[in-house]
Image (spheres, coloured by chain):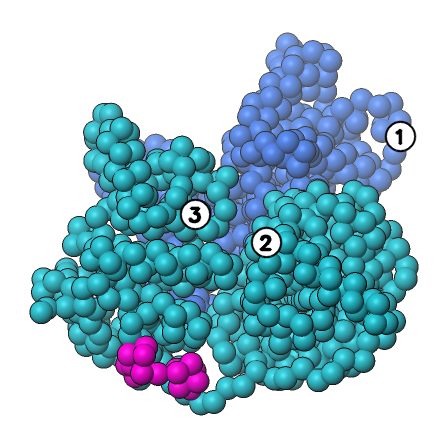
Amino acid sequence: MTPVLELSGITKRFGHVTANEDVSLHLDKGEIVSLLGENGAGKTTLMSILFGHYTADEGTVRVEGQELPPGRSRAAIRAGVGMVHQHFALAPNLTVLENVMTGTEPLWKLRSDRAAGRRKLVDLSARFGLKVDPDARVSDLSVGECQRVEILKALYNDARILILDEPTAVLTAQEAESLFATLRQMTGEGLSLIFISHKLHEVMSASDRVVVLRRGKVVAERRTSDTTREELAELMVGRKVERPARPPATPGAVLLEGVDLHVRGKGGASLQGIGFKLRAGETLGIIGVSGNGQTTLAGLVSGLMAPDSGALLVKVQTVATHDVPHAIAAGIGRIPEDRNAEGTIGDMATWENAVLERIWSPDFSRRGVVRRAAARSATEDIIKGYDVRGATVDGRIRLLSGGNMQKLILGRVLEAGPDILVAAQPSRGLDEGAIAGVHERLLEARGRGAGVLLISEDLDEVIALSDNIRAIVNGRLSPAIPAERANAQLLGLMMAGDWSAAEAIEAENTHAL
Amino acid sequence: MRFERRDHPSRLLTVLAPIGAILAALVVAGLLIAIAGANPIRAYGLILKGAFGSRLGLSETLTRATPLILTGLAAAVAFRARLWNIGGEGQLYLGALAVPALGMLPIMASLPAPISIVLCLAVGAIAGMILLLIPLGLRLRFGVDEVVTTLLLNFVAVLFVSLMIEGAMKDPLAFGWPQSVPVPDSAILPKLMERTRLHAGLLIALAMSIAVWWLQARTVFGMRARAAGLNPRAAAFAGVPLGRTLIAVACLSGGLAGLAGAIEVMGVKGYVTTDLSPSYGYSGIVIAMLANLNPIGVIGAALFSAVMFVGADSMSRALSIPSYIADVTVALSLLTMLVAIFLAQYRIRR
C-alpha cells in the first residue's frame, strides 16, 4: 500500500543554519504519527515545507504517490492536506461559519452559499464530535473552541491528512484528553494525522508512531508501544536531562498579601475578591485554565494595574501607587507571560532590553541621561552569568531563541535581587534543557529567601516547584493545598471549580497547625 | 519569490540605502527630462551649478534647507515613536503666525533683540505644540487616528492664518494685500551672509539636529520614546509611561515644526502670508523618511531637497524643462527610499 504521505530527503537551509537535513518520513492511512523534537529541531520548518509555506532546497513531498509542486499552499490544500496552526489564524470579528467558509469560495462569486456551508459544517461537527455554534463570534470563544474551529476549517476543505502543530499548548489537561479522543475518531474515519509536540506524555498517549527530530535530522523512529517516555526524552534532547528537585521549604515572614482584591481586567478576566499570602522562601503555584484571571493577577502584582477595591500588601505595607517603578523599587521581580510581546522589544539592543525597566534608577541614569557604560557592563554580566547564548550587548534581542531570551529576562530580574518574584508561564514554549535551567533559577531565588508566585498552566511544573498550590477559576482563588497532596485528579477538580476536596485538605492543615 | 527579514541589517546597507534611493530617483527623473527633450546629464549639471555655483545660489540653497531641516526633524522624532504627525504644515503656519501676534504686544518694541528673538522662537514652538497636542489628546482619550486629524488640521490652520491676516492681524500698510503685521524689528534674525537671504536660523536648525540626536540616543526620554514606538505593550510592562512619553514626543515634534515657521518668518519674510511655505511641512515627511528617521541624516536629506528645488529653478531658465521636475524628483526619492529601506531590511529569496 502506498503511504498517504511521503516526505523524502527534505533539506532546507536558512543561510548558515540547516533547519532540515535529509529528512524522510511517511504516514499511512488511518495513522497518527508524532513528530517529536525540541524547539528549533526543525519540526515546524518541515511541516511548513509540506504545506507549501517554504520551498525545500532538496527532496520531495508526495501525497498518495503524487508529487506536490513546491511552495504552493493551494496545491497542498487541494491534495487534502490541512494544517492546524499553533497560533490560530481566525478572524475574531467573524462568526464560526464565516471563518470556516473564508477562502473556500471564489472571490468573484456574488453570493456566498451560507446554507450549504452551514449544512456541511453542522454535518462535520456532528460526525467528529466537534461541538461549536456556527453563529458564535470567534472573539467570544474559548481557546479550546477556537481550536475546534481550526480543525473544522481544515475538515471543511476536505482534508484527509491533518497536521496539528503543538495543538495542546493552549489546552488544559481535560481539553487535551478530549482532543485526543477526537483525533482517534478521525483516524477511524480514515483520516491520517501528524501531531507535532515536545510533550512526551502526549506523544505517548496520542500516537501510533513517533518520529524524533533533533537538530533538523531524524534521529529515531519508534512504535509508541515499543518505547518509553525516558527513552524518547533522551532521544529528543540527546542526553539525559533531569529537572532539578525542590528542597524542603523554610517559609519566613509574609512578603506579599492580597486582601479581597477586585480588579477589572484590561483585556483579561477580572479578579473577584481574591486573597492569598506568600511567604519568604516559599513558592505559591497558581494553576488554572487560561483566561480565568491569571493575566490580571500577574499584572496587578507587576504594577501594571491598580485594584478597584481590596488591598495588596508588600512586606506588610499596603501598596499605594500601582505602577511599575514602584513595584520594582519595592523588590518585586517580574517575569512576564509573553516574552516577545511583553518581556522584550525585539528591535532594541540587548542592553536596552536589559535595563529599560530599571532605567530610572541611579544605577542606569543620571539626571535623565542614560549611563551607557554602566548599563552595558551590567548587560555583559547578565550575558555571562546567565549563559545567554548568541547574545551580544549591542545585538538586537529578536535574534535570540526563546530560551536565551528567557535567560536574559531572568538575569535582569534576579540581578536586582528581588524579594518577591512573579513568574508567569516561565517555561512556556521552552524545550527541556531550557526548562531545567529556568526551574533551577526559580528554586535558587526561593532558596535565598525570595517568595515566588508561580503562575503556570503546566501542572508538572507547578507540582515540581511549588510548596502550595491554588487554582484560579473565574477570577477567584481556590483554597491552598500543599504540593505533596497534589495529583492530576485533584488539581483537575480544583481547576474545574470543585473545591470541596481542597477545602477539606486546607481545613485539615489549619487544624494540624 | 518571497522576502525574508535580514537578521543583521548591515550598517553599510543602512547608509547606502538613501544614496541608492536618490540615485534611482535621479535616473527615473532623468528619463522624464529626456522625454521633455533635454539631456539629463546637462540638466543635473545645471541644477548643481544653480544650487552651488554662485554665492547667491549657495545662500539660497541653505536658506531653503533651514525650514526643511526643522520640519524633517519634527516628522522624524514623531515617527520614531510611531506618532504619525502629518500636520507639520499646519504647525509651521501657526508657529509663524504666533510671531507677529506676539509682536502686536506694545512691550515687544522696547525689548532688546536677543530676548525678543528667544521669546518669539519660544512662542512659535508653543503654537506648533498646541496644534499637535489636540490630535494626540484625541488619540489618547478616544483612540482617534492621528493621521487623519493631523492632516486635516493643516487645512484648518492655513484657513485660520488666512482669517487672521485678512482680519485682526492684517497689516494696514500693505495696500490691501492679505499679509500680517510685520515681525517686530527686534525679532528679525541676523544675516549670515551680506546681501543674501541666509540667516541665523540655519545655525538653530543645525543645533536642533544635534540636540535631537543627543536626546534620542543618550537620554532616558529617547530610549522610552523609541520603546513606546517599537512595542507599546512591552514598553508599558517595563514601566514606560506611554501617555506621558507620547505627550513629550508631541511637544518636541510640534515644537520643531512651529519653530520652522517662526524662523522662516523671522529670518526671511518678516510677515506672514498664506504662501509662506511651499509645503515645507509635507516635505519634512519625505526628508525624515529619506534620512531613515536619523536626526543627523535629516540635514543631508534636507540639503538634497533644497538643492533640487533651488537648482531646478535656475535649470529651468536655461533649458525648457519646467522646474516641477524638482517636485517630481523629491517625490520619486520618497518612493525609491521606501523600496531601499525595505531591501536593506529584507532579502529576496526565490
What x and y, as percent, mark residue B340? 38, 55
Query: Vertical placement of A243 versus A203: above or below?
Result: below
Q: Give residue B110's mark.
A: 1
Q: Nearer the viewer, residue B173 or A7?
A: A7
Query: Vertical placement of A285 versus A275: above or below?
Result: below
- Tell me which residue sits at (64%, 20%) in the image: B161
Disc 3 marks a residue whose amino acid type is Cys
Q: Chain of mark 3?
A: A
Q: Which residues are magenta?
A: A220-234
Q: Nearer the viewer, residue A120 or A506?
A: A506
Q: Quadrant of residue A335?
A: bottom right
Q: Answer few, some or many: residues within 10 Å of disc 1's Cα (few below 14, many 20 plus, some between 14 and 19).
A: few
Gap in angstroms between the C-alphas marked 3 and 2? 19 Å
- Tell me which residue sits at (71%, 84%) in the image: A247
What x and y, as percent, mark residue B303? 51, 49
Query: Which residue is label 3 attached to?
Result: A146
Secondary structure beneath label 3: helix
Q: Which chain is cyan?
A: A
Q: Quadrant of residue A440?
A: bottom right
Q: Quadrant of the C terminus of chain B?
A: bottom left
What x and y, as percent, mark residue B336? 36, 49
Secondary structure beneath label 2: loop
On the rendered structure, is A448 left or right of A94?
right
Q: Colour of chain B?
A: blue
Query: Which residue is label 2 attached to?
Result: A496
